[in-house]
């Protein structure tokens, strides 16, 4: 059996996992520069009166594409027999395609063009995400995964901050898209240049059969219950987070009433990102040292719920800053340990990227559901207080799900 299918037992060096952290930084710049600022700004530029609905349609379609493309490209990555490894080709090509899609989006002048452009961005970035997530179970031993997961989560979190920074620093959404596209391409160069990916031998790849390929995307909860509970945990925590953050720019402007909400959003995300970055690295290392995972997720769910309750009842700038710190503590711990958990409940070594792609549907599906849930609440069914209380409840239930995972301490 080739090294590509073996369980890794050799610790990876910091120099390597910093390169995969940078890849994730680039991916999340491509995701969240548009999601947090550029798509909202572009929606308002097209039709100020219907900006919420436009944003909901664009992000909903994009998330639907994400749901399909992540496991699909993950499965194709698992079958790739390139001499560069299974993951590098998808990371490199995905970066170029994602940058081209961002440039297309920059020139979109209709809602339909925005939808097409954002769907293309989602497809390319999710091809990269499926491959880059799979390198953890490919190359990192279990005893080091929360630590490395903390650093990967650091890249994801700073990607939000950098994406928002690029989005608001260049004087308009078109320049913001261009800046995100350039950053995406640059972010993958160190990893591609010094990758440790292990090639899969052609004779080890299963013969392709469409029926078997399609059936491989169903992982029975009865046969793999820990995988199902891990999926449910990630789904509900991310659904609560997606509901809470979708209209954050509009919340600051319309509910809190701050001047220059884009700048205030950047400050808020900056505070949040620093706290998440520190917490993810510390919690990941701590989890590896004591050999515990689930307790971190349960506590993080309680902390996240507290942050969203603050947003619900105290719509002030000071309260928003406090909530950002508390949310950063909770979500930082969750991101690092959750990533370790999902890599430890995968059914098959030969389908790591595909199975993680199915797990990542729990990231994408909330982006589809959040607009459908959040839009009617904000516009007429309780407003922002109801929105944040619902988000808190959903996330808290998700964190409790992790207790049902039996194979993880």
Image: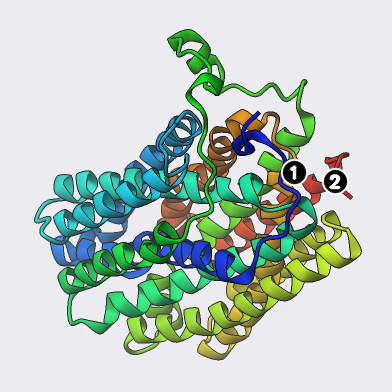
* Residue 402 coordinates in the image, percent (x, y): 79, 47
The residue located at (11%, 51%) in the rendering is 110
Q: Which mark is residue 265?
A: none
The residue located at (17%, 76%) in the rendering is 172
The residue located at (47%, 28%) in the rendering is 79
* Residue 248 drawn above or below residue 295: below
> Do the residues under discs 2 and 1 have CB atoms within 8 angstroms?
yes
Q: Residues within 10 Å of mark 2 (few under 14, many from 20)?
A: some
Q: Quadrant of residue 60?
A: top left
Quarter that holds the N terminus: top right
Q: How is the protein colored in the picture?
A: rainbow
* Residue 44 drawn above or below residue 93: below
Nearest the eye: 345 or 170: 345
Instruction: Point out the frontmost of discs 2 and 1.
Output: 1
Q: Secondary structure at mark 1?
A: loop
Nearest the eye: 106 or 114: 106
Q: Which residue is under mark 1?
A: 344
* Residue 143 coordinates in the image, percent (x, y): 80, 56
Q: Secondary structure at mark 2?
A: loop
* Left or right placement of residue 227 versus residue 26 in this view: right
In this rendering, does residue 310 appear at all? no
Q: Which residue is under mark 2?
A: 408
* Residue 224 drawn above or below residue 155: above
């Amino acid at each position: 059996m080739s090294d590509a299918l073996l369980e890794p037992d050799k610790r990876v060096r910091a120099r390597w996992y910093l390169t995969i952290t940078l890849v994730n930084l680039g991916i999340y710049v491509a995701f969240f520069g548009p999601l947090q600022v550029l798509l909202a700004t572009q929606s308002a530029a097209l039709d100020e009166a219907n900006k919420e609905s436009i944003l909901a349609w664009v992000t909903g379609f994009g998330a639907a594409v994400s749901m399909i493309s992540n496991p699909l490209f993950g499965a194709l990555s698992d079958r790739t027999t390139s001499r560069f490894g299974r993951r590098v080709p998808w990371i490199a090509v995905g970066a170029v395609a994602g940058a081209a899609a961002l440039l297309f989006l920059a020139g979109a002048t209709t809602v339909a063009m925005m939808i097409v452009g954002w769907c293309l961005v989602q497809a390319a970035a999710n091809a990269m995400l499926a491959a880059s997530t799979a390198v953890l179970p490919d190359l990192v031993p279990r005893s080091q995964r929360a630590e490395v997961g903390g650093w990967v989560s650091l890249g994801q979190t700073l990607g939000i901050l950098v994406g928002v920074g690029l989005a608001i620093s260049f004087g308009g959404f078109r320049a913001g898209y261009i800046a995100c596209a350039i950053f995406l391409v640059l972010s993958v160069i160190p990893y591609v240049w010094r990758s440790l990916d292990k090639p899969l031998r052609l004779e080890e790849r299963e013969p392709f059969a469409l029926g078997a390929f399609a059936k491989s995307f169903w992982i029975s909860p009865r046969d793999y219950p820990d995988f199902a509970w891990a999926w449910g945990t990630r789904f509900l925590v991310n659904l609560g987070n997606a509901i809470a953050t979708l209209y954050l720019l509009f919340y600051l402007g319309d509910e809190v009433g701050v001047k220059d909400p884009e700048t205030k959003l950047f400050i808020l995300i900056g505070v949040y990102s620093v706290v998440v970055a520190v917490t993810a690295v510390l919690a990941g290392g701590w989890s590896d040292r004591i050999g515990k995972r689930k307790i971190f997720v349960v506590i993080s769910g309680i902390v996240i719920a507290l942050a969203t309750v603050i947003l619900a009842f105290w719509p002030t700038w000071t309260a928003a800053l406090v909530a950002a710190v508390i949310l950063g503590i909770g979500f930082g711990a969750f991101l690092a340990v959750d990533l370790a958990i999902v890599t430890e409940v995968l059914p098959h070594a030969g389908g790591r990227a595909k199975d993680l792609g199915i797990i990542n549907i729990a990231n994408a599906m909330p982006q589809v559901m959040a607009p459908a849930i959040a839009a009617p609440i904000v516009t007429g069914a309780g407003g922002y207080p109801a929105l944040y209380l619902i988000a808190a409840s959903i996330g808290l239930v998700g964190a409790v799900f992790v207790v049902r995972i039996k194979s993880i301490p």
